Image (tube, coloured by chain):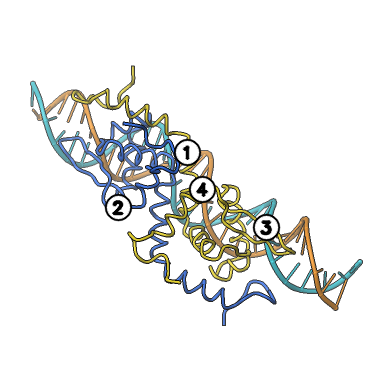
Chain colours: A yellow, B blue, C cyan, D orange
Amino acid sequence: MSSSSCIRVFADTAHIEQSKHRLAAAEPELQSLAAVLALAGNEVRLKMLFLLLDKQQLCVCDLADVLQMNVSAISQHLRKLKDGGVIQARKVGQTVFYSLSAAHLSVLQPLLTPASTSPSLTPAR
Amino acid sequence: MSSSSCIRVFADTAHIEQSKHRLAAAEPELQSLAAVLALAGNEVRLKMLFLLLDKQQLCVCDLADVLQMNVSAISQHLRKLKDGGVIQARKVGQTVFYSLSAAHLSVLQPLLTPASTSPSLTPAR
DNA sequence: TTCTTATTTAAGCAAACGCTAAAATACACT
DNA sequence: AGTGTATTTTAGCGTTTGCTTAAATAAGAA
């Protein structure tokens, strides 16, 4: 039934079929996980998330200051993070404060606060 | 000393400086973490990692079969993962078996096996 | 209202990405 | 040697990314 790429005599078709099914079952989760990881997989955006995890709330120009980058570039990264549901915006006057949103935080937080295994991402308070 | 993007009268320069220092300290780790996440942030590659976590070892054409993709495309993704130190290759005859390498596994494994919190990525054996 | 300030948006562009198709390499078998 | 299989590599191409610059919104302050 399934078209093989190679002619493996001893290839176990059973295992391959099993993998296909497991993959199909996990597909939607993997898809949304990949989207979040793609967002966090950019160094600038990962730094933003790191800073937001530390500071709760930061405005655009704070981030621009800390990251030493163009305000426009920062704003565009923030937009992507917001569109991905990773952060949320709160406007206070003319300044917009961004903070981590609950969604996907369970995947991001352990990455940026490696508990005891990896030593140094969380500075001692 | 630090050039501000905005003229926030009540901006606390102290906090900003603090963030800068924390960021500088975490920078190398964030950089390598971002590299790994960028690799995992591609849906095809994330699926590969998911399958390798489940099956320990898979050859190129197995992956091509399961993912229903061109062998060449698969091979190119595998190369990126190998270059990033995420997987390793073992050649057995003419077939090359790929498996997860120890490096970075501590960050990838929890993503793909969400323990108890998120329910369904790990199918019941 | 006019003048700043904070942020977003749009346009442009170089670089990176991910795929396809084709050629190259490597290994086994006869 | 020659044939077939598994994998990699190369070149090409369309798409996406991430930045810069400039213009557009939005909201205080004079």
Callout 4: chain: A
Kindly report which numbered mark, 2 or 4, lies closer to the viewer in this rendering: 4
Pointer 2 residue: B85
Image quadrant where one finds the C terminus of chain B: top left
- In space, the residues marked 4 and 1 are separated at their CA atoms by 13 Å
Whether labels 3 and 2 belong to a single chain: the reply is: no
Q: Position of residue B16 (x, y in %)?
A: 56, 73
Q: Tell me the element at label 4.
A: loop
Residue type at mark 1: give it. Gln
Q: Position of residue B18 (x, y in %)?
A: 51, 75
Q: Tell me the element at label 1.
A: helix
Q: Is residue A109 left or right of residue B52?
A: right
- In space, the residues marked 1 and 3 are separated at their CA atoms by 28 Å
Residue type at mark 4: give it. His
When the figure is inspected, residue A40 is found, relative to residue A3, above or below; the finding is: below
Callout 2: chain: B
Whether labels 2 and 4 belong to a single chain: the reply is: no
Residue farthest bottom in this picture: B1
Q: Which of marks 4 and 3 precedes in the sequence?
A: 3
The residue drawn where x is 37% and y is 33% is B123
Pointer 1 residue: A31
Closest to the observer, A106 or B99:
A106
Residue type at mark 2: give it. Gly
Residue type at mark 3: give it. Arg
Q: Tell me the element at label 3.
A: strand
Callout 3: chain: A
Kindly report which numbered mark, 4 or 1, lies closer to the viewer in this rendering: 4
Whether labels 2 and 1 belong to a single chain: the reply is: no
